[in-house]
């Protein structure tokens, strides 16, 4: 087995990498920003190489960092449930994050999520663009403000434009909605149920695009 090359970023490797496995192996050694120093491992995307839907979150969380897989924590479980209710087969989607390393600050014995900075997003963005280029999804779904602004520009506002088709050079269709972790932070159970319903409706629009073959 060939040892993956040690690299400092995505760079010109993308001209050579033509599969997700090759990209994943290369990203495992990425040191393009300082986040790799405190992370357990790179958390690359996961899903079929011909997925019709590609979902993009912000960054892996504590559980994802330990497992080495995206969306395996509470937010991921909620995402799975909402995808099923919207009529989207989770096994046929590709899930990933803008930033591939867990950024955190200590709080006692816990590791608390910290929002990635612009320089960290910029360092990781070529990996995401390469994933999209390999998968070639019909629809890209940005989950939350960080993902939406990384993909669609800093002026994009999820609160204003969620659920609406967004022009996007890397896929025929793109939309943005909230991150499922935001649903878990709702102030009470009633608000949480309402926000989950809205989230499912956003995902149903994606399912409609797939059904209609637009």
Image (cartoon, rainbow, N blue to C red):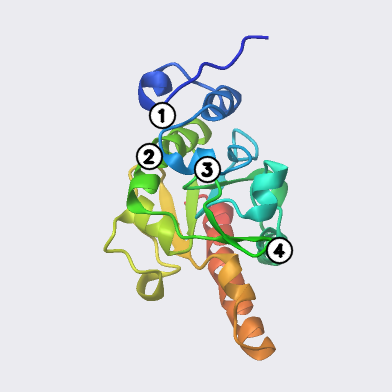
Q: What whole-number distance in Å separates the C-alpha atoms at marks 1 and 2?
A: 7 Å
Residue 84 as seen in the image, left or right of residue 161: right
**Residue assigned mark 2:** 123
Precedes in sequence: disc 3 or disc 4: 4
**Where residue 79 sits: x, y (%)?**
66, 62
The residue mark sitting in front, 1 or 4, is 1
The residue mark sitting in front, 4 or 2, is 2
C-beta proximity under 8 Å, tags 1 and 2? yes
Residue 187 visible in the displayed image? yes
C-beta proximity under 8 Å, tags 3 and 4? no
Precedes in sequence: disc 1 or disc 4: 1
Precedes in sequence: disc 1 or disc 2: 1
Mark 4 crowd level (few <14, some 14–19, many ≥20, 10 Å Cα): some
Residue 68 as seen in the image, left or right of residue 147: right
**Residue assigned mark 4:** 74
**Residue assigned mark 3:** 100
Please tell me whether mark 1 sits on a helix, a strand or a loop: loop
Q: Residue furthest front?
A: 108
Q: What whole-number distance in Å separates the C-alpha atoms at marks 1 and 3?
A: 12 Å
Q: What whole-number distance in Å separates the C-alpha atoms at marks 4 and 2?
A: 27 Å
Q: Residue furthest top?
A: 1
**Where residue 115 sits: x, y (%)?**
46, 60
Residue 89 visible in the displayed image? no
Residue 198 as seen in the image, left or right of residue 122: right
Mark 1 crowd level (few <14, some 14–19, many ≥20, 10 Å Cα): some
Precedes in sequence: disc 1 or disc 3: 1
**Where residue 142 sits: x, y (%)?**
47, 57
In terms of image quadrants, where is residue 88? bottom right
**Residue assigned mark 1:** 9
Q: What whole-number distance in Å separates the C-alpha atoms at marks 3 and 4?
A: 18 Å
Precedes in sequence: disc 4 or disc 2: 4
């Amino acid at each position: 087995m060939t040892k993956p090359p040690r690299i400092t970023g995505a760079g010109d490797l993308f001209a050579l990498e033509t599969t997700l496995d090759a990209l994943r192996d290369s990203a495992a050694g990425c040191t393009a920003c300082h986040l790799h120093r405190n992370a357990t491992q790179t958390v690359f995307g996961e899903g079929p190489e011909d997925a019709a839907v590609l979902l993009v979150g912000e960054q892996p969380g504590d559980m994802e960092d330990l497992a080495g897989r995206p969306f395996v924590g509470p937010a991921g479980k909620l995402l799975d449930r909402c995808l099923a209710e919207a009529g989207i087969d989770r096994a046929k989607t590709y899930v990933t994050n803008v930033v591939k390393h867990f950024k955190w600050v200590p709080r006692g014995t816990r590791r608390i999520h910290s929002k990635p900075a612009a320089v960290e997003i910029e360092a990781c963005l070529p990996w995401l663009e390469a994933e999209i280029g390999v998968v070639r999804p019909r629809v890209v779904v940005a989950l939350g403000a960080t993902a939406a602004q990384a993909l669609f520009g800093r002026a994009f506002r999820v609160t204003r434009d969620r659920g609406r088709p967004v022009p996007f050079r890397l896929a025929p269709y793109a939309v943005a909605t909230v991150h499922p972790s935001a649903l878990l932070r709702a102030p009470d159970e009633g608000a949480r149920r309402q926000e989950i319903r809205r989230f499912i409706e956003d995902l149903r629009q994606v399912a409609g695009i797939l059904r209609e073959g637009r």
